[in-house]
Structures are given as C-alpha cells and as structure tokens.
Image (spheres, helix red, strand yellow):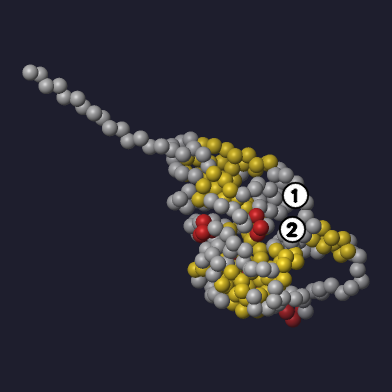
Amino acid sequence: MKKIFLSFICFQIIVFSQQVELYGIAQPGNALIGKAENLAQVMLNDKILQFDKEGVFTFGFDRDAKGIHLLKIKYTNGKSEIKKFDLPNREYDIQKITSTKQQFTGPPKEELPRIERERELMRKARSRIGIIDTAYFASGFMLPIENAKITGVFGSQRIINETPQNIHNGLDYAAPIGTDVFSMADGIVQLAGDDFYYNGNFVLIDHGQGLSSIYLHLNKLSVTTGEYVVKGQKIGEVGTTGRSTGPHLHWGVNWFNSKIDPHSLIGIGF
C-alpha cells in the first residue's frame, strides 16, 4: 500500500494597511494628527515628519500658510499615497484704530540686556523642541483653564494710527489671579520661566514631534524645567506678570515655527 504524504506549505500573510487616517481640519493656523500602520516615511512637502511606533504623527499650517501642500506617505511594503491639501483663505479679526491714547511704549534702555538674555533662553528651549519623536500629545487635548472668558483670539491684529501691531498668536482668557492653569496634553517642560520681561512667569511644554504649548503671565508656577507632565496636570496659576494689562492667561501653540490656533486641537479624537 502506497502511502501518499501531503505536504502543506504555510504562508505567513502580512496585511498592510494602505490608508492613513487624518484628524483635524486643513486650513491656515490649524494642526492635524495622522495615524497609519506600517509606515516607512511621512513627508509634508519636502519636510520629513516624525512618527512613533504606533504610527502617530502630527503636522500643522502656519497662520499665513497658502496654496497647495502635499502629504506623502510611504509604507514598508513599498506602496505609497499622497494627500493633497488646497488651503482655503482664512479671515482674521483686524481692528483699525485711530487713537491719541498712549499705547505700550518700548522697554527702557536699561532692560535691553535682560530682554536679550531671556530671548536667548527661549531660543535654546525652542531649539530642543522637535528632538523628541514620541507622540506625547496622543493623550489628547483639553482646555488649559476652566470657566474663563476669551478676550483675545488667534490671528488677530490691531492697526493703530495706520501702524500694524504684532499679530496675536494665541488665545487670551480673562480670569481672576490664582485660577488654576492646566497642561493641554502630556509632555515635558522645556522651560519654566521666572519673571521674564515680556512673558512674566510662564511654562513652555514639549508635546513631541515639534508640537509645543506655552502659558504666559502666570502668578505662580507649579512645575519645573525638565519635568514630565500629564494632560490636566496643574502647571501654574493665572496672573498678570510680564507685559500684561490685567489678570489673564495667554495660551499659545506651535508646530516647530508655525503658529497654530490652540482651538484647532480641542475636540480632535484619534
């Protein structure tokens, strides 16, 4: 009796996801979150983006970004895809004011060396943002203050007596001195600044992959430079330190050097 042996060859089947998921709205001043499996490389135009082991990455468009931008994704199996963003025009609150009232004047001459020292500290702190490729922001986002009124919006600008003033690259919240301020997401404190001329007491947090947030004019600090913080952790209290006209929190967000509307992050689920 002849025995017939059947050989079975087992193939390992690897299923590659070929679809990137994007969260957020592509427009000037907004940040988006992306996620995909089996990533080999992600680029926004000619800039290589970081991604973590879960395939999470982020990118953003500056307040004044225009035109067409390409998100290029390569997968480990050699496949690729391209997402095209044709950014719409975005209007901002521009106020033209004719006034004889005294506005903020320049700093006294004796303060200039101090201001330059503080700028150098900020430059060094910001130069470290982008080194961390861990997506600490994957914890999600939250408002840094509760029950506060917005008194300054992102992207706004005043033109006083036909002279353009600095663009407002963040959100202002009016609140009593001592109101708790929280970190919008997990991250590492790159700089807990004490009594800077313009910023007052402030906290700069690195959320990974070039995403950072800053909280200005605080009365008290609750964290120190180098500390790891989690979303919702108290980092300080509202104050009116530095270049401030009254108690409020200035909350700003950057993706590298791009100015991001903080509200573009709130509500993103991924």
Seen at 65% across and 78% down, the residue is 178
Identify which residue, 265 or 89, lies in the foreground. Answer: 265
Specify whether residue 104 is in view.
Answer: yes
234, above or below 157, in the image: below
Q: Where's residue 253, x and y in %?
A: 64, 61
Seen at 70% across and 44% down, the residue is 87
Name the element at disc 1. loop
Seen at 72% across and 76% down, the residue is 247
Seen at 59% across and 62% down, the residue is 142
Q: Which residue lies furthest to the front in this view?
A: 147
Q: Name the residue under label 1.
A: 90
Q: Where's residue 74, x and y in %?
A: 50, 40
Amino acid at circle 2 = Gly
Q: Quadrant of residue 169?
A: bottom right
238, above or below 187, in the image: below
Q: Are marks 1 and 2 in contact (CB under 8 Å)?
A: yes
28, above or below 234, in the image: above
Work out whether mark 1 precedes mark 2 in sequence or the reverse, and give the earlier one: 1
Q: Mark 2 points at which residue?
A: 155
Q: Where's residue 192, x and y in %?
A: 58, 73
Q: Residue furthest top?
A: 1
Amino acid at circle 1 = Arg
Q: In which quarter of the image is residue 259?
A: bottom right
Mark 1–mark 2 distance (CA, rounded to whole Å)? 10 Å
Query: Mark 1 Cα within 10 Å, few/some/many (few <14, many 20+)?
Result: few
Specify whether residue 257 is in view.
Answer: no
